Amino acid sequence: MGYRSASKTVMAALLSGALLVGLTACSGGGGDKAAAVKTGEFNKEGLPIVKTPVTLKALTVRWGNMGDTFTKNQWMIDLEKNTNVKIEWQVMSSNDWNEQKSIMLASGTLPDIIFGDLAFSDSDIVNNLSYFRPLDEYIDSYMPNLKAALQETPELKKLSTFPDGKIYSMPARLPSRPKTKFQPVINKTWLDKLGLKVPDTIDDLYNVFKAFKEQDPNGNGKNDEIPYTEKGLSMDFLNPFGITDPNGNNMLVKDGKPVYYPVTEEYKEGLKWANKLYEAGLIDKEMFTQDATMTSAKQQNADAPIVGFSYQWTPDAVFGKWKDQYVTIPPLAGPDGKRYQSGIPVGMSLYRNELLITASCKQPEIAARWADQFYTNEAGIQNFWGAIGTVIQKNDNGTYTLMDPPSGTSADAWYWEQSVRDFGPKYVSPSFEKNIVLNPKTGDGLKLEIDKLGSEYVTTPFPNVMYSAEEFQELPTLTTDIDGYAATMRAQWVTKGNIDAEWDAYIKKLNDMKLDQLLKIRTAAYERYMSVK
Amino acid sequence: MMETRNAAVAGKTAGGVNTRSSDAVLEAVLYGLAVLMLIVLLYPLYFIVIASFSNPSSVAGGKVWLWPSGFTLDGYKELLKHANIWIGYRNTILYTAAGTAIGLAVNLSAAYALSRRDLPGRKLLSLYFIFTMFFSGGLIPIFLTVRDFHMYDTFLVMVLPFSVSAYNIIVARTFFQTSIPGDLWEAAQIDGCGNLRYFAQVVLPLSKAIVAVLGLWIAVGYWNSYFNALIYLKNPDLYPLQLILRNILITNQMQSGMGSGEAAQIALRLASLMRYSVIIVSTVPIMLLYPFVQKYFNQGVMIGAVKE
Amino acid sequence: MKMASGQAGTTGRTVRQIRRGAGLYVLLLPAFILTLLFAYKPMYGVVIAFKDYSPALGIMDSPWAGFKYFEKFFQSYQFDNTIRNTLVISLYSMATFPIPIALALMVNQMRANRFRRFFQTVTYMPHFISTVVMVGLMLILFSPSTGLLGNLYALFGAEPPDLMGSSGLFTSVYVWSDVWQHAGWDSIIYIAALSAVDPSLYEAATVDGASRWQKVRFIDIPMLLPTAVTLLVLRVGGLLGVGFEKVYLMQNDLNITSSEILSTYVYKIGLLSSQYSFSSAINLFNTVINFALLVIVNQIAKKTSSNSLW
């Protein structure tokens, strides 16, 4: 190989490399511009929505491996026929969505419609506002169903208003939802075996736990009973002390003012009580270290039930073959004699970010009209359980009942397969709900039944407020530091006690971590939320 | 040669009694330690195997010791219900084969070039690669680059763009530096052999050990990878095995979000059930690769060539 | 023994050297180009750390933020803690560096071929266990109530330590479980290096009356030294880069004071709201420190042995 050719090769390679870098360095995103809808094609009201069929791209994120089975829902199929709008679904799994989300946002090409609140969080939207269209005009002009819903349930409007005063996403109201979140569940068989009454106060609970631990209620001669176990200490355990936190943000509303409860006296009392139980061996020593699998293994222990008490959605959810031994009881009375239940007084049914129309969408009116189809009562129930005729039975007297799931699958799993369920726009009016007749023995119907035990004690929680982009800059570090520290001390005080001696240092440290700044942000957001009419 | 070695093994050395007894002590300690380590290593591995045949509640509840508890094949049955596992296997085998071939070619060549002290600009070039081990533009710019080269959602993206590993290059370079004597190149030059031919016909055959190790590292890397597929692939027909398995095993996120509804409970149960069978299904094939590669690590296979 | 350099001046010599090295440049070319295109071309992305990056605006059009995010990180409450935890884990882990080497030496000494191959195979197997299963396994086996550990202690009537729920023990549990899992795999490169030892060296040593131990000390170990030094230097270059997944899975409220490291902290703040610029700044800080350490250690290696990275 001669000098000239070798050197040329090397030079050529380096030059082409540099050229490539230069040429392609400034390429950005940007896709093709789709054709705008032709005038005369679009119908402002009535069906179909467009005269010639149109295709819109929609993205939805579902849990785990659920896939796109919901597209076979008959109502969805009919929708396409009736509206002339075909949807090209892109279904993503929640598993690794976070990374893929960054890529999608960075590449700048989003589909026309974002469906379901699992896709983009408040912060994703607020920080990338130019990607999403403000919806106020579309709701006003093209979405009569949603407009009526917002008037009937003003809370929805509060929920969906972004910090700049506009609405960028559509909300949902789910049907047949309870007011309470997790309720106390206890092993009734054990109570009966030991001749005990259902505990009414926290002192009763202590005595019951002691009896569970010492008197072998599962009758297998082994001292294997665990009166209370959970994966980490749930705040529900402190409900009797006035601590209710269904949204998991460490905030309460007391006398109309937001309060950070991990610095309150009630919280302190609650932890002292928990520590008392822990030291008496009444709380699982592994509560803070076990993972979900191990907790579940205890709840479904193979040869005999070993868990006495827990906070759950329904009593049959987690206990496997022992589920018939457990019942839900009313909330326990705390030191002030009052009862408190975690939940939402207007019902655990309101959600936002269920549908977004992106700036990439060239036919937003069509998308808006298409979305509005979801906001009728019948649409609502068919997108929560399944289509009429497959899952729901419409009866002659105007009521709706749920059919039995096919063998081999649970009701809940069947609904997830047949419909979008928790996700996507929907609205079922409170007045319509009485037409839905659910089986009170299982699933959603059962929850409504046991809900009655606690619904009158549900406190108004710190709502799901919206933060501005600036607030989102500070919030993550504040919460990671402050809430993280609170959780660490919580675990330490429950397991090792000594809360009185360490309390003042704890408060001081939280203040050093800028607790006041966190409170300021939360309060500002709260006031904005409450001021929306 | 061999006879002398065997004689040494048998302890009949010229050194006499003292050497023999210290050797024997060493031998005893060696094997004793080895057996102890085997127990510590084997038990958890054995546990995984029997757990894959056990009731998940029993496993997490500590009921599994030496035998499966609540024997069940459900872990495997559930897993094999997913037909796309076979697509995953096919893809992963293809990616691993192609990726390893490309990776070996690219990295070994560069490593050899850098191992030569007479390479002009050697220091700078080494730094060129090492620098990339530390500084990276980040996921988003790299994604944009891949997309601009039209490699997004293609077979190529899985085996070419990320095939250069500065780490592998450095390790292989060290190997070349210490194991290939300089005299060989001198001799070859006299015979009129160029660098390329020398590399292909002399260096590589003498470097079976490093080729084997690097090949193993690269192959295992491709076998286990899922992240690149997650970011750069959209078409499920191109998904590798690990990505498919990940999607089957539902992560913790799901339980906390779905609450304790029945569907979430079933998901948790299935995940616990399949956790161990997934390991067996996904790693046994690649583990079987090692014995074939092992023979290249046998002592005394190389370097006799210098004497010729 | 290089050919006599020409006296025609440095340019002439350089030209001649490049010509001689032409084939070597060809060997370098594929790796060079791939690195240029997929590592250097995207490197402009490091500016994200100095900007208020928003995906909607793109990297080029996002406004400049200077050192804002670096300051935010330095002033954050978690700065000291996370760096300290990361360093502790890293240094502790580095102390176990000789173990794969010892393992390789051990395997090399085994004469019984079948046992040796069996042993070697078993040692590398744990490497393939996924992190999720590994941590799950640890939770089960170390459970004070139902695990192997708990039962062993119970046999002797003692109270088992809560390995997974102790902040004092966290680093030890993390590091030693890593050793268990990866020592075998990590020893492969050393076994390969040892296989390149010229057998005649052993013979010569035997003739000189060397014991097995002396052979190990004077033949095997020097043979491994270049590889070991290289790997050690590279290891130092990864000092602040303790892996995320395993620590995250092992974290709980009881051990968090020792288990909150840089990568888990970055992950958590990103959960609530994607903090592209902030996490990018932390990562950049990370890698700058790592690289600086690498440069220092490389210099030391250059002076003390003849092995260095460049």
Image (cartoon, coloured by chain):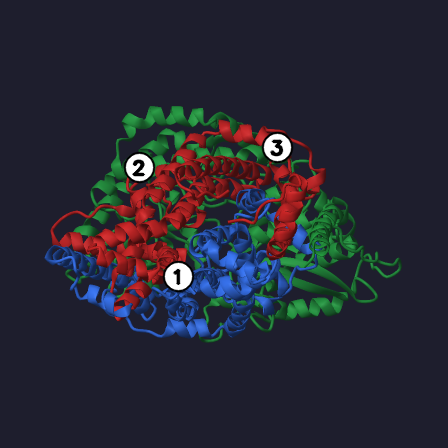
Chain colours: A green, B blue, C red
Query: Which residue corresponds to the image point at 34% horizontal and 47% vertical from the top-left?
Result: C97
Amino acid on which disc 3 is placed: Glu
Q: Chain of mark 3?
A: A
Quarter the N terminus of chain B occupies? bottom left
- Residue corresponding to mark 1: C128
Tell me if mark 3 has few (under 14), some (14-19) or many (20+) residues whose alpha carbon lies within 10 angstroms of its own.
few
Looking at the image, is B274 positioned above or below residue C53? below
Q: Disc 1 versus disc 2: distance between alpha carbons?
A: 35 Å
Q: Chain of mark 2?
A: A
- Residue corresponding to mark 2: A492
- Residue corresponding to mark 3: A470
Q: Position of residue B111 (x, y in %)?
A: 52, 54
Q: Position of residue B2 (x, y in %)?
A: 28, 69
Tell me if mark 1 has few (under 14), some (14-19) or many (20+) residues whose alpha carbon lies within 10 angstroms of its own.
many
Badge 1 and badge 2 in a common chain: no
Task: Tell me the mark number nearer the camera, choosing from 3 and 1.
Answer: 1
Q: Is residue A454 visible?
A: yes
Task: Tell me the mark number nearer the camera, choosing from 1 and 2.
Answer: 1
Looking at the image, is A283 positioned above or below residue C73? below
Amino acid on which disc 2 is placed: Gln
Q: Disc 3 versus disc 1: distance between alpha carbons?
A: 44 Å
Tell me if mark 2 has few (under 14), some (14-19) or many (20+) residues whose alpha carbon lies within 10 angstroms of its own.
some
Amino acid on which disc 1 is placed: Phe
Query: Which residue corresponds to the image point at 29% horizontal and 55% vertical from the top-left?
Result: C105
